[in-house]
Amino acid sequence: MHDELLTIGRFARLCRLSVKQLRHYDETGLLAPVHVDPGSGYRYYAPEQARDALSIALLREMDLPLAVIAEALAAEPEHRARVLRAERDRLAERISRDRARLAMLERLADGGLPGYEVTMGREPERRLAVVRAVCSPAEIGQRFGECVGRLLPALGEARIAWRPPLWALYPLDLEERMEIAVGAETPHGGAAIGLKSEVLPGGPVAETVHVGPYAQLPLAYNALFAAIHERGLRPLAPAREACLVGPAEAPREELMTRLVIPVKERGA
């Protein structure tokens, strides 16, 4: 039988993998040898295992997790395609986040921390009709769009006038799973039209305006929180964003967003 099989060294060279990798894939159940000599412990592989081994090498080169590779190899073609498309979508999302980070780094490298004028003021009480969603920080943009797509048709169907701008509400700490809301100011909140109602209390706030892509909003939040702490104040949730100039009205570089964070004296 050994004449028909390949030693682990020969198989590794054939499949462009290292012996160490093959041993690891065996230990994790990803690619087991067809025979292990009970006396010596030597591993032997069949030539037809080369296709799976080469696929593993290719997918690992793309940084796919071993668990995902195992699922893809064991799946029927239709399910395998779904698994790989899901990984493609995750990779595309990561690339998008990396591009946003790259743009912020370039902006910081060219001009240092951008200057934001942070002002203190008072906000009136606002009654909003809102829709909510749960998401991760990376999903905020997508979920925001989905919320707008639910909110505006509901307002239109109910023929309820609302006062621009649209408001987005976020927790102060961006956790892995968090609730966000998108709302419009209406005379009676959302109860009368079948939407959720949110009352934003009036009071002192710190605010600034960000001009540019939404992906660079962290720069504005950095300036806003720094100013709040320097004044000895405590920020209160939720952080509020008012869309003054949206994507339908201007290119990315000219988007305008008002950031508002309620504050109170420390210890109050």
Image (cartoon, rainbow, N blue to C red):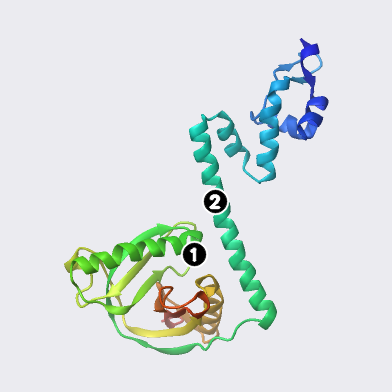
Residue at the extreme top: 1
Quadrant, the N terminus: top right
Kind of residue at badge 2? Arg
* Label 2 crowd bin: few (<14), some (14–19), many (20+), radius 10 Å: few
Foreground mark, 2 or 1, reads: 2
Q: Is residue 105 left or right of residue 42?
A: left
Q: Earlier in the sequence, mark 2 or mark 1?
A: 2
Q: Which residue is mark 2?
A: 90
Describe the element under mark 2 as helix, strand or loop. Answer: helix
Tell me where residue 113 sits by quadrant: bottom right
Q: Is residue 238 left or right of residue 200?
A: right
* Label 1 crowd bin: few (<14), some (14–19), many (20+), radius 10 Å: some
Query: Which residue occupies the foreground of this view, 142 or 65?
Result: 142
Name the residue rendered at 42%, 69% in the picture.
170
Tell me where residue 177 sits by quadrant: bottom left
Name the residue rendered at 37%, 61% in the picture.
146
Name the residue rendered at 29%, 66% in the picture.
151
The disc label shown at residue 174, or none: 1
Report x, y in % for residue 18: 79, 34
Report x, y in % for residue 179: 39, 61
Report x, y in % for residue 240: 40, 75
Query: Which residue occupies the foreground of this view, 36 or 165?
Result: 165
Name the residue rendered at 28%, 68% in the picture.
152
Kind of residue at badge 1? Leu
In the depicted structure, whether residue 111 falls above or below residue 21: below
Quadrant, the C terminus: bottom left
Please indicate, yes or no, whether residue 27 appears anywhere in the rendered image: no
In the depicted structure, whether residue 102 falls above or below residue 25: below
